[in-house]
Image (cartoon, rainbow, N blue to C red):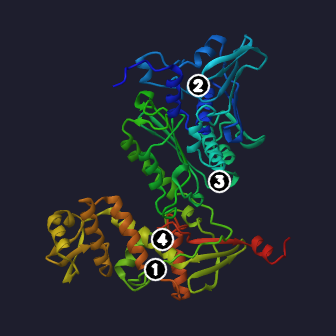
Amino acid sequence: MNQIKIMDQALSNLIAAGEVVERPASVIKELMENALDAHATYIKVEVKGFGLEQIIVTDNGIGMDKENMKLAILPHATSKIYTKDDLLSVKTLGFRGEALPSIASVSKLTIQSRKEDSEGYFIKTVYSKVDDEGFIGMNVGTKVIVEELFFNVPARFKYMKSEYQEKNFIIATFEKISLSYPNVKFELIMDDKVVKSTLGNGSIKALIENIYGRKYSEDLKEIHQTIGKIHAHAYLLSPRFSKPKRNDVNIFINHRYVRNYVLEQAIIESYNTLVMTQKYPIALLYLDLDPTLVDANVHPQKMEVKLANEMMIAFQLKPFLTDALRSHSYKIVEPLKEIKNETYQVQSLDFVFEESKLLNDNLEEVFKEESKILMDKIPYFEYIGTLLGTYLLFQNDEGLFLIDQHAAEERIRYEYYETKIGQLKSDSYELIIPLDLALDIKDLEIIKHYRDLLKSYGFEFRDSHLIKHPLWLREKEVEMAVKDILKQLDDEHDIKLDVLRNHLAKDISCKGAIKANHQLSKIEIDELIKKLRKCQNPYTCPHGRPVLIKITQYEIERMFKRIV
């Protein structure tokens, strides 16, 4: 075994840099956080050569004096915490004292800073050692210049992505930090072009428009809720602005952007049936809570935090998010966009408007008049025909509306079944003739093992025969419902209310809905639209596909060159 020696400072800095400085975006993150900790109200980020050539971060914070600047580049030197107790209640973005030393070890670093009532001063480092220093004329604040990043660790270039991807990492990092502080003005300049900028006026709506685009603030839903000593502020963007990845489910804890799966999942699930499968919403969740409940000292990059009682917070927050989204009126999708052809197979069990007194009575109970707001979610229009036996066409002064008859009835059925399953009454309908189900030995074992639990939901069996089922479930859909419940019992060993409600409601509503190319009468169409108007969310089917779209009169006239 080789003799143990104290590691050289330059080598130890390089090792620390491997954890803190992965790519140019990591440098920008650390420098922006330092600027925010210095109480800056304006931060400008300038990038050249996607960060490898030069990164400049300028702020108008409180600045540093000569002595503090020299200490700042030393390992574990920090002004953020001094004792063990400080570490248990971190109130700043940075605190580990690793950022500047790590950056200095893999670049040529220059720090220029000036405090109020003092002269500006600069130091320049190479290989973590001061190479030049002196006084400089400048405004109050700090400017950090990082040049030739990774010049002394060429192996790091092997792990760099393409220039396009690295620029995207930089933009994403800038956006997350900008969203964290609505009261700070940010500006990102890449290769002498302004890429992103925010106003810093405290308006979340303006911030969303600056970061995502003007149209993204349409149909914005705000929720402000206090859960114990936690203050939650959520800004939920319209479901139509969904993304292929969950990166835009933004969570900020005490103004720190973090990744937290439990809270992210609560937000995603609140959009259930509003966005398509494998799509994710755009949302901002700000949590203000006691710093002692948050442990940010988990990873050098401080992106992961341990949060006390995170499951309870998510559980209590989710109903507020769900109710806000479902009660909201959204803008109908327009104009018509190209939709990829997808194979969508359905099995029709029966027709929703068949004569069934029980179902009609239940639908009338569920879809009774509640408020004028729900009726106004869909404008009034006139039926003019059916396209391809699937899309109902309507018109009014605004333009042309197309409604997918299958998706519309899916939504109606889903809300009916979701309500009925959600009540979970044990009232059962006893069959005169027991229903013989196609159950295998494994199914019978599950029924035997969970007999009491199934009975509490309204299902009773005699061997492979069903003798009772819940009142809300129609006889033609019983076997499908039983199969779904038995599968959940086999997988989860329990019947979870939310899984049962959503899965069973989606499955039954889809398979029982009107099939495509099924011609409806005028009476049936009127009844369909009447019930659709009374839905909480008439805009999407349970799978997130649009129910109706709109082509405005202006767009139609432009297509015919009546308007140039």
Quarter that holds the C terminus: bottom right
List the residue tagged with mark 4. 411
Q: How many marks?
A: 4
Q: Is residue 150 left or right of residue 214?
A: left
List the residue tagged with mark 2. 100
Foreground of the two, 89 or 409: 89
CB under 8 Å between callouts 1 and 3? no
List the residue tagged with mark 1. 345
Callout 4 crowding tier (Cα within 10 Å): few <14, some 14–19, many ≥20? many
Mark 2: secondary structure: helix
Mark 4: secondary structure: helix
List the residue tagged with mark 3. 216
Q: For the residues carrying marks 4 and 2, which lies nearer the camera in this image?
A: 2
Q: Earlier in the sequence, mark 4 or mark 1?
A: 1
Foreground of the two, 438 or 426: 438
For the residues labelled 4 and 3, the Cα–Cα distance comes to 25 Å
Q: Earlier in the sequence, mark 1 or mark 3?
A: 3
For the residues labelled 4 and 2, the Cα–Cα distance comes to 55 Å
Residue 484, quarter of picture: bottom left
Location of residue 483 in the rendering, given as x and y in whole percent from the top left corner? 28, 73
Location of residue 322 in the rendering, given as x and y in whole percent from the top left corner? 46, 54
